[in-house]
Amino acid sequence: MENPPVMILCGGLGTRLHEESDVKPKPMVMIGDRPILWHIMKTYAAHGLKEFIVCLGYKGHVIKNYFLNYKTHSADFTVALRDPERIEYHNHPIEEDWRVTLVETGEHSQTGARIRLAGQRYVKTDCFFVTYGDGLGDVNITALLAFHRAHGKIGTITGVRPPGRFGEMRASADGCVHEFNEKPQVSDGLINGGFLVFQREFLDRYLRARDDEILEQEPLKRLASDGQLMVYQHGGFWQPMDTYREVKILNELWASGQAPWSI
């Protein structure tokens, strides 16, 4: 069975990291010497998933330039100044077998609109992954995909248990999601940690053709009310990157050599 592509949402403004996001989109904030986007992609690539669809919006040209110049960013090279077009690379990035499609999905589009546009253009497989360009975890992607294919429903969402400032999901023992609330007043359940999987039919059946379609509101709520959303429970490491404190946490973990997501 053909491996599904991985869609990464990279179009948001990142307003809580405004000093960084004034010059680059949040997925390009550095963790160590690589942007967090690279770390996310490495997580999937370690499980054999090397087809990526990157949904661009705010300052998308920065991400485009990064991939257009990927080899020069990642390898040593020699330039003959008399023939500057001739570049000799000395150590090739192991990620060269990645295939990355960069999709302009609108500077002000919401998450659901980005997924629908990019998915209709570039998803050709029976299912596809979706995740956010600002969170890391040691999620077992192979097990997540196997879980999704085994239950036969339209959607799977990875549930984690982080701070109470997030929304929550309520699920039964068999993993079926019965209620999805993005920002409830009181949270004592699982929250959306990203690392989602959808059947391709989700694009047309649950996402409306409008720029203000937010994945985490009507589409996921309807999927849950239809009994078509399952949760893959992840009890390991998961960390979003919404604030400078969280950027610091991720950088300290990486610098220590003990980053749980490190492959």
Image (tube, rainbow, N blue to C red):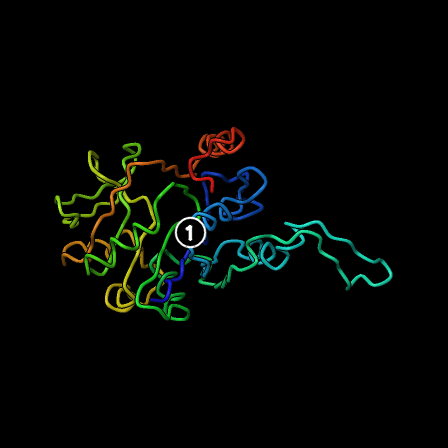
Residue at 40% across, 61% down: 5
Image coordinates for residue 56, horizontal then vertical, percent: 48, 58
Task: Say what secondary structure mark 1 lies in.
Answer: helix
Q: Is residue 95 left or right of residue 16?
A: right
Along the viewing direction, whichever of 131 and 183 lies nearer the viewer: 131
Q: Is residue 187 left or right of residue 246?
A: left
Label 1 sits on residue: 44
Along the viewing direction, whichever of 29 and 210 lies nearer the viewer: 29
Residue extending farthest right: 82
Vertical position of residue 161 compared to residue 81: above or below: above
| Number of numbered callouts drawn | 1
Vertical position of residue 210 compared to residue 28: above or below: below
Residue at 17% across, 54% down: 224
* Residue 239 location, quadrant: top left
Along the viewing direction, whichever of 74 and 60 lies nearer the viewer: 74
Image coordinates for residue 29, horizontal then vertical, percent: 53, 42
Residue at 32% across, 36% down: 236
Q: Amino acid at mark 1?
A: Tyr
